[in-house]
Amino acid sequence: MGETAYYYSTNNPAERVNFQTALLAGMASNYGLYMIAREDIPVLPMERIEAMKGMTYAGIAYEVLEPILGREVPPERLRSLLDDAYDVRKIPTQVRTVKGQTHIMWLTRGPTYSFKDYAARFFGRMLNHFLGERGLRRVVIVATSGDTGGAVADALLGLDNIDNIVFYPGGSISEGQRRQMTTLGHNVHAFEVKGDFDVCQALAKNILGDASFALELFGDRERFTSANSISVGRLLPQAVYPFYAYSQIETSSEPFIASIPSGNFGNMMGTVIARQMGLPVAKIICGVNENTEFPDFLASGTYTVRPSIKSPSSAMIVSHPSNLARLIDFYGGHIFDERDPSTGNVTRPGIIDRMPDMDAMRRDIVSLGISNPRHFETMKDVYKRYGIILDPHGAVGWAALEEFLGGRHDRPAVIYETADPGKFPDDVYRAIGVVPELPPGMKDQAGRPERIYSLEAEPERTPAGLKLSPAQVSEAKEKIREIYNA
């Protein structure tokens, strides 16, 4: 059993807590994110990594996560939780060779047909376990740009010690994605917000950071916690994907390239941690859409948040990724959002007051922006050449890898496919002229009644894009009061 690791706030290194405390709290002090120190990330011997070949996904998850969680969860209990979370009958994972040494890892066959199922199922089971041990309840607050909300809602549905509030941007997600949140009922409450994902994320952070509201409503300052990629409970399980990918490909121990469609950077940051744990990753390709703040930062060393740009890869319409704070911290820097001290609202996002090691970051990571037209061109090309239907997010991963390798397939590489194409029928039809089949669970939800809490308040419109308004915060709090005072 490994040593117990400690987590600190990216905005307050003096705060040091264990995993259980970080999971229950959600957001770290001073509006920071919990992060494990680089030197505290356990390094696995190569023989242990090679021994993963032939293991189940749950078995590999245990090998990766047990050294990080250490003494906090008894080994047999951890194994049982992971066997339940990653039961192959509920969430099968496939790595497929496409051409040469290029592979696709299908993280799309769980209950909500998104890679977000993997982190959400671990998060939900671990949180419910710790709450049950301590006789506590939590309200999990999550913002979604598409798939997170449905995955978290499904993972938390019916759990004894948890309620769930989801904020999603009205008009920016597909009907199928919306119904994965709004048709569940019970302990899942879905809020439609005017604005983009960044507004939803700011609203989630505002509620999470308002201990006085939690005290007023529940008599418990710590009742709210997060399940976005800002939660360390969703970050750590994303270190498992690349270990599983490596176990499934023939590399002769040659380092492989991970090409990752990236929005809020949770899956990319998980792969950064896996690399630090000793996994032989030659390069991490961070594919983004036309929201190119990160590739521009890598190129210039200047980080500028701009208004978000709509894209077919809707879950990646993110101009200021939350996990960028962890990435910059990992490379020795510091980034924070300036806030109004009276409201907690962000007044100036993305201020870097200590630069990371840019040379090291550029050695490890390349980031490429894929234009909106190129999403469709890539989907059409891959379907024509290989008969494979990609969704718009997987198309970003494919296009970024092709650009990096100059169209060759001569180096071991794995593209993360992150959502079932059936969730994006209009985009797929536009690209290839074929309507993809709707996944069976979504067919069932198409006929169910919805429960939606609509926020009518408008966001503020600024030169930097849409911004959460005080009116939105007030209306959200009033509706939350109505739910829990009913």
Image (tube, rainbow, N blue to C red):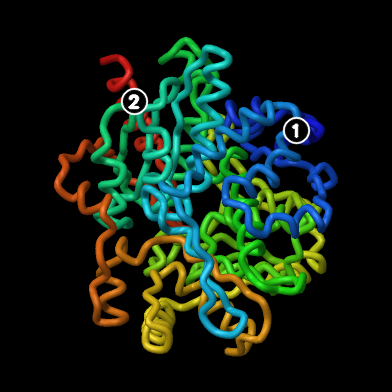
On screen, residue 219 above or below 412: above
Residue 410 lies, in percent from the top left, at 66, 86
Residue 147 lies, in percent from the top left, at 40, 52
Dot 2 or dot 1: first in sequence order is 1
Image quadrant in which the C terminus is located: top left
Q: Nearer the viewer, residue 50 or 330?
A: 50
Residue 157 visible at all? yes
> In the rendered image, which residue does mark 2 sit on?
480
* Circle 2/circle 1 CB separation < 8 Å: no
Image quadrant in which the N terminus is located: top right
Residue 463 visible at all? no
On screen, residue 141 above or below 439: above
Residue 212 lies, in percent from the top left, at 50, 18
Q: Which amino acid lies under the numbered mark 1 shown in the image of this protein? A: Gly
**Residue 171 quadrant:** bottom left
Q: Is label 2 in a helix, a strand or a loop?
A: helix
> In the rendered image, which residue does mark 1 sit on?
70
Q: Is label 1 in a helix, a strand or a loop?
A: helix
